[in-house]
Image: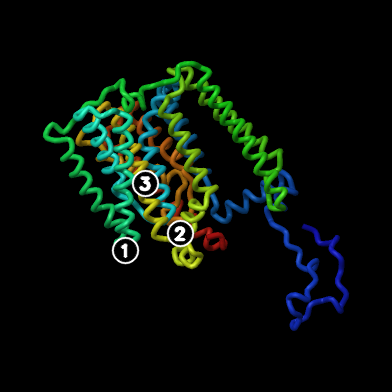
Amino acid sequence: MSTDNQPALDDAEVPGPHTRADEIPAQAVPAVDPRLLVREQGLAGYVGEFKRKMRAGDLGSLPVIIGLVIICAVFQSLNENFLSAENLSNIAVTMVATGMIAVGIIFVLLLGEIDLSVGSVSGVSGAIFAVMAVTHGMNEWVAVVVAIVAGAVIGAIHGFFFARIGAPAFAVTLSGLLFWSGFMLQLLGSNGTINIDPDGLVGKLTTYYFSDVAAAYGLAIVAVVLYFLGSFFDARRRSAANVPFRPVGEIVLRTVLLAVVAFGAAAIFNQYKGLPLAMLLFLVVLVGTDFVLRRTSFGRKVFALGGSVEASRRAGINVTAVRVAVFSIAGTFAAIGGLFWASKIAAANQSAGSGDLLMNVIAAAVIGGTSLFGGRGRTWNALLGVMVITSIQYGLALEGIATPIQYMITGAVLLATVVIDSVTRKTQKTAGRA
């Protein structure tokens, strides 16, 4: 910003080495937020801001979006059915179970911690529901509530040992992984499998579709309108408070991009069976948890703890309570994800929560953009990350690639993401942004 218009100071007004701070004229130290300069410079300002972020290592979701485009292009070139409406709809439904669990693990990762028990907790949730609803004939709604509450309590137990007792989260949740796996096997009994009603409440989580085309398009319209109104009124509120805000032109551009994605997805769903109930519920969860993290005091406390525990404690944050709550949230979403897995296979069995589930959950969160070092991430990262993981799995399955190769490729993608995260963090430290 040019300073030609600033009034010159007389020699008598130039602050010397012994001038007190309260004697310096206010106009001599103009405070201008650099983000305001970007807004004032128009398109050139945004380009400059983008370059600055790239140099500082602030990549955001750009790598995963580029990766997702490359994945789709490669698999579509290998098999023309990859981008078919049926395959994309199946990917959308399948990824919800892993995505739900990843939402919970993101809360833990924001603290800079890890929860290795979420796979086992998801299996326990499915087993509890099956035993209550099928074996004992309990109402399915009540059984669902019991299963989810059980997941929340299990997570709170882990959080208690970590936050109150001081045991490492890695050790506590590793113990939980083993304990709850055994508990699930005990619940399922000698048969090891309990089939659930495919037409029941849980059974329909992954099999029900809103076949009316108005459902998918209606959801797209609601999402676009709410986004525009929320962004517009937020900008007005920030403008009235004299803090940086997005101009109307930028809001309109972002809204148009969202509309393209939303209506494109709606058109794809309507070409197959319609809007999947599973996807609708997942989007509701993402919107709700994103609001909690970005718009509530609890969310700010989570980010604060991920930045510095000691600073958070000195700021008056109840560190123990927040940690316990975060692990309880992880257990809750693990339980919800377990119900979706039970719906997908129409049963609760001994393999639930095992295999590559834990790896895929952590990979989805990290690949989506959540930092393993804490303090950076959003629950929307779960959507991007799980899309990458599930797309790779479906693409390899269409090509008949063996499961061991799928594990190797997924592991390589996760390693690449962790390396990018580490390099990004170092770059940000160098640039003074971390």
Q: Nearer the viewer, residue 66 or 368?
A: 368
Q: Which part of the image, by quadrant, shows the N terminus?
A: bottom right
Q: Of callouts 1 and 3, which one flags the residue occurring earlier in the amino acid sequence?
A: 1
Residue at the spot 30% in from the left edge and 38% down from the top edge: 146
Q: Which mark is residue 136?
A: none
Q: How is the image coloured?
A: rainbow
Q: Which residue is mark 1?
A: 166
Relative image position of residue 262 (x, y in whole percent): 55, 28
Q: Of callouts 2 and 3, which one flags the residue occurring earlier in the amino acid sequence?
A: 2
Query: Marks 2 and 1, how far apart in space?
Result: 16 Å
Q: Which residue type does callout 2 highlight?
A: Leu
Q: Which residue type does callout 1 highlight?
A: Gly
Q: Nearer the viewer, residue 381 or 63?
A: 381
Give above or below for 178 relative to 284: below
Badge 1 density bin: few <14, some 14–19, many ≥20, Cα 10 Å? few
Q: Which residue is mark 3?
A: 330
Circle 1: element type:
loop
Quarter of the image for residue 92 reads: top left
Q: Which residue is mark 2?
A: 305
Left or right side of 403 for 247: right
Q: Nearer the viewer, residue 298 or 175?
A: 298
Q: Which residue is farthest left?
A: 190
Query: Marks 2 and 3, how far apart in space?
Result: 16 Å
Circle 3: element type:
helix
